[in-house]
Image: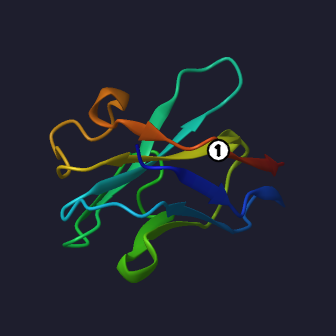
């Protein structure tokens, strides 16, 4: 199992920015895929962005494209989500996810593609 620890959440006003981070425990996978998911109160968890840790290839949900940027630091087993122009509807618990054998780009937003999830970090955006 790969353990994931998120940090960096908080409260911000609409239009502001936040960056969340996720550190993965040591592992032997060579082409992992990592992603950010979020879950708002009363809603299902949804995929926000994914990144191939080896190549740096990324993809985003349409609701965040152009506002959020996912990136990684391979040496530190860490991914980041830079969130700009935040909206109240971005309020959610943000969790990172890990899959050891690469990103399935045709379905990266589906939870079933990942075998490990972190506990999450709260992001609250006020209007």
Q: Position of residue 80 (x, y in %)?
A: 51, 68
Q: Quadrant of the N terminus?
A: top left
Q: Position of residue 69 (x, y in %)?
A: 45, 67
Residue at 29% x, 67% y: name it.
Answer: 53
Q: Is residue 26 left or right of residue 9?
A: left
Farthest residue to the bottom: give it: 75
Q: Position of residue 115 (x, y in %)?
A: 35, 35
Residue at numbered disc 1: 120
Q: Is residue 55 left or right of residue 36?
A: left
Farthest residue to the top: give it: 42
Residue at 17% x, 49% y: name it.
Answer: 101
Q: Vertical placement of 82 versus 107: above or below?
A: below
Which of the 4 quarters of the picture holds residue 75? Answer: bottom left
Provide the secondary structure element on which disc 1 rests: loop
Q: Is residue 118 left or right of residue 112?
A: right
Q: Is residue 89 left or right of residue 113?
A: right
Number of numbered labels in the structure image: 1
Neighbor class of circle 1 (other Cα within 10 Å; few <14, some 14-19, many 20+) is many
Q: Identify which residue, 44 or 87, lies in the foreground.
A: 44
Residue at 71% x, 24% y: name it.
Answer: 41
Q: Vertical placement of 16 versus 120: above or below?
A: below
Residue at 73% x, 44% y: name it.
Answer: 88
Q: Identify which residue, 14 or 110, lies in the foreground.
A: 110
Q: Vertical placement of 100 versus 115: above or below?
A: below
Q: Identify which residue, 12 or 105, lies in the foreground.
A: 105
């Amino acid at each position: 199992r790969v353990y994931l620890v998120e940090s960096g959440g908080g409260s911000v006003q609409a239009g502001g920015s936040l960056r969340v981070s996720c550190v993965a425990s040591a592992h032997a996978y060579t082409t992992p895929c990592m992603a950010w998911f979020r879950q708002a109160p009363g809603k299902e968890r949804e995929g926000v962005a994914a990144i191939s840790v080896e190549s740096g290839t990324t993809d985003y949900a349409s609701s965040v494209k152009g506002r959020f940027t996912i990136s990684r630091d391979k040496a530190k087993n860490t991914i980041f989500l830079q969130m700009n122009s935040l909206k109240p509807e971005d309020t959610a618990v943000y969790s990172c996810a890990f899959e050891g054998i690469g990103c399935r780009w045709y379905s990266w937003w589906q939870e079933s593609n990942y075998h490990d999830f972190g506990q999450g970090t709260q992001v609250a955006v006020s209007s």
